[in-house]
Image (tube, grey):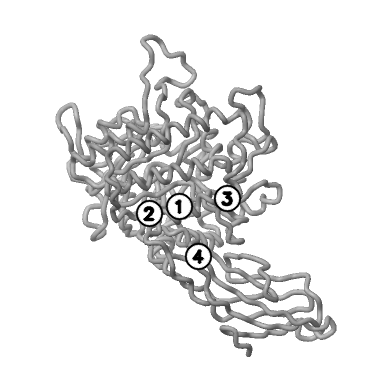
């Protein structure tokens, strides 16, 4: 999924309504009360089905986070000078949440030299730097691949170029190019886990190539497996599909080498794991073509969480571990599945609103239960921006045309605008060390045993002192899970929480003494010992020569 860069998004934030920890209590708008009730029931049924087969025992599941600013669908923005710095911040936020692995989407034709041309080496260097940054923070690295998106809400990269590129390839050329590119990605990033193939139906829609058919998908996977074999010692490889796929069982059989024969193609080389994308959990989805009245007999009705459990059962029978490389609770009615004509943009934009927070947390609990029941290698929830921000729904930021049972037209914003706004909200909240109840709940669930160790004391506290302001700087604290932010106190009163290791305190009086403290905290509410510093702001006239006075303190000792 494509995510715009935080720096660009922050510029839009002045017109937003957004929140962090208080969002959970927002009233469900009337346009969504039916959907909220339906999803609540679906989640209860899904949870009960898992509980009926799960003993409650836990497994050594790795909980991962999406590194969305490194997603290939961001395109040319990846090469912006600020991008790697933003990614470093993203990694620290994910570490604070408690994840132990990071997932990066590097889909075809990213790192395919004939497509990228003269910029090829720049993108190779970028992704090598991303991999190095991930490992520097102690994370496992997951790389996932399908095809880059030429259009739609998630497409920010190479749109027109992709629309010309894909049709110019035959199926054989597409498979060969995709396989050779997978080898480049493996050698460049050296992942611990590589998902070679994800949503075959989405890849077919993006590329126009018939890889949504199990026979062609299997042929493509065989070629890719051969291309990456032996390149990275210890790298585990897998492939998967969405739980909504009508032919999910055939794909599951192929990838687990189950019931192979003339009517059931299978991979020739065993995979290390079976991957799944889990988004809709609706129970009564009607499988029918968009905009077409379903002819008799009545259309098939699908229960998507049952599909997910069937996929798990197939993996279990084959003795294969699973992974979930993309997942979030998709906000879609039974009656809307396969009917909305916008390719899912409205459904995805809906996820931005804060009134869904409690359902998102219920879904994450179910995800946790399912992963432990199956003994999965790892799971990677999708909407990591919702760890930091949601939008507060109002008529002013409602989605155009998304009225539920109400009158039309409604809403002022396109799905793309809503989607961009929640990114901008996260870009504002992260520097203020603000986390949503969803981010806090996921931390509490995946950090086990509970974190009782406080971060280390911030080091090297020093200041640039002016007549009406003080700029504090310090070095990063360390923590056994991750530092969630820093509390800044002036004269014993907390005046700010920040994520960066700096803070500017403005509006001060000249020729006045101030005592500052900085404390690191984590999401388990552990707080470090304070670093302390006393300063005195000068009279304005004293700044005529030097401009500032620098005073340093360490651990409460003033120098």
Residue 43's image quarter? top left
On the image, numbered disc 4 is attached to which residue? 522
3D distance between C-alphas at marks 4 and 2: 18 Å
Is 451 left, or right, of 79 in this rendering? Answer: left
Q: Position of residue 518 (x, y in %)?
A: 60, 74
On the image, numbered disc 1 is attached to which residue? 442
User: Is residue 443 or residue 301 the one in the foreground?
Assistant: 443
| Residue 368 visible in the snapshot | yes
Asked if disc 4 and disc 2 are in contact, CB closer than 8 Å, the reply is no
Q: Position of residue 312 (x, y in %)?
A: 27, 39
Label 3 secondary element: loop
First reached walking from the N terminus: tag 3 or tag 4: 3
Q: Which mark is residue 187?
A: none
3D distance between C-alphas at marks 3 and 4: 18 Å
On the image, numbered disc 3 is attached to which residue? 389
Q: Position of residue 258 (x, y in %)?
A: 17, 36
> Could you classify mark 4 by the number of other residues whose Cα lies within 10 Å: few (under 14), some (14-19), or many (20 or more)?
many
First reached walking from the N terminus: tag 1 or tag 2: 2
On the image, numbered disc 2 is attached to which residue? 63
């Amino acid at each position: 999924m494509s995510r715009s860069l935080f720096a660009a998004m922050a510029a839009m934030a002045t017109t937003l309504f957004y929140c962090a920890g208080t969002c959970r209590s927002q009233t469900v708008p009337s346009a969504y009360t039916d959907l909220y009730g339906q999803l609540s029931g679906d989640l209860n049924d899904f949870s009960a089905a898992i509980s009926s087969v799960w003993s409650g025992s836990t497994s050594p599941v790795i909980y991962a986070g999406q590194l969305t600013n490194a997603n290939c669908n961001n395109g040319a923005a990846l090469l912006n000078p600020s991008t790697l710095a933003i990614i470093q911040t993203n990694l620290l936020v994910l570490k604070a949440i408690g994840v132990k692995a990071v997932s990066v989407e590097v889909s075809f034709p990213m790192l395919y030299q004939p497509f990228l041309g003269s910029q090829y080496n720049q993108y190779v260097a970028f992704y090598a730097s991303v991999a190095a940054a991930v490992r520097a923070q102690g994370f496992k690295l997951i790389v996932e691949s399908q095809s880059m998106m030429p259009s739609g809400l998630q497409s920010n990269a190479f749109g027109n170029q992709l629309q010309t590129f894909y049709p110019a390839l035959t199926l054989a050329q597409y498979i060969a190019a995709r396989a050779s590119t997978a080898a480049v990605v493996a050698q460049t990033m050296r992942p611990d886990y590589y998902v070679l193939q994800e949503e075959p139906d989405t890849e077919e829609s993006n590329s126009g190539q018939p890889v949504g058919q199990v026979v062609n998908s299997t042929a493509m996977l065989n070629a890719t497996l051969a291309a990456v074999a032996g390149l990275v010692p210890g790298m585990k490889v897998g492939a998967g599909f969405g739980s909504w796929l009508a032919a999910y069982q055939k794909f599951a059989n192929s990838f687990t080498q189950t019931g192979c024969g003339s009517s059931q193609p299978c991979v020739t080389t065993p995979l290390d794991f079976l991957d799944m994308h889990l988004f809709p959990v609706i129970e009564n989805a009607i499988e029918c073509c968009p905009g077409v009245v379903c002819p008799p007999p009545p259309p098939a009705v699908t229960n998507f969480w049952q599909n997910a459990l069937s996929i798990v059962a197939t993996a279990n029978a084959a003795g294969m571990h699973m992974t979930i490389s993309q997942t979030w609770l998709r906000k879609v009615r039974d009656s809307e599945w396969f009917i909305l004509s916008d390719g899912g943009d409205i459904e995805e934009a809906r996820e931005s609103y804060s009134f869904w927070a409690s359902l998102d947390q219920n879904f994450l609990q179910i995800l946790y239960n399912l992963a432990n029941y199956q003994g999965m290698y790892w799971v990677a929830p999708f909407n990591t921006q919702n760890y930091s921000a949601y939008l507060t729904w109002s008529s002013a930021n409602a989605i155009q045309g998304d009225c539920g049972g109400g009158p039309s037209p409604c809403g002022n914003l396109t799905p793309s605008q809503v989607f961009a706004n929640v990114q901008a909200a996260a870009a504002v909240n992260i520097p203020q060390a603000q986390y949503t109840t969803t981010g806090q709940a996921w931390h509490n669930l995946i950090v086990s045993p509970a974190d009782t160790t406080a971060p280390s004391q911030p080091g090297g506290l020093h200041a640039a002192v002016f007549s009406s302001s003080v700029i504090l700087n310090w070095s990063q604290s360390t923590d056994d899970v991750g530092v969630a932010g820093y509390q800044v106190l002036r004269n014993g009163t907390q005046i700010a929480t920040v994520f960066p290791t700096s803070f500017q305190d403005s509006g001060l009086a000249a020729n006045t003494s101030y005592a500052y403290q900085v404390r690191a905290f984590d999401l388990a509410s552990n707080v470090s010992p304070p670093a302390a510093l006393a300063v005195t702001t000068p009279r304005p006239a004293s700044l005529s020569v030097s401009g500032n006075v620098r005073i340093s303190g360490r651990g409460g000792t003033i120098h």
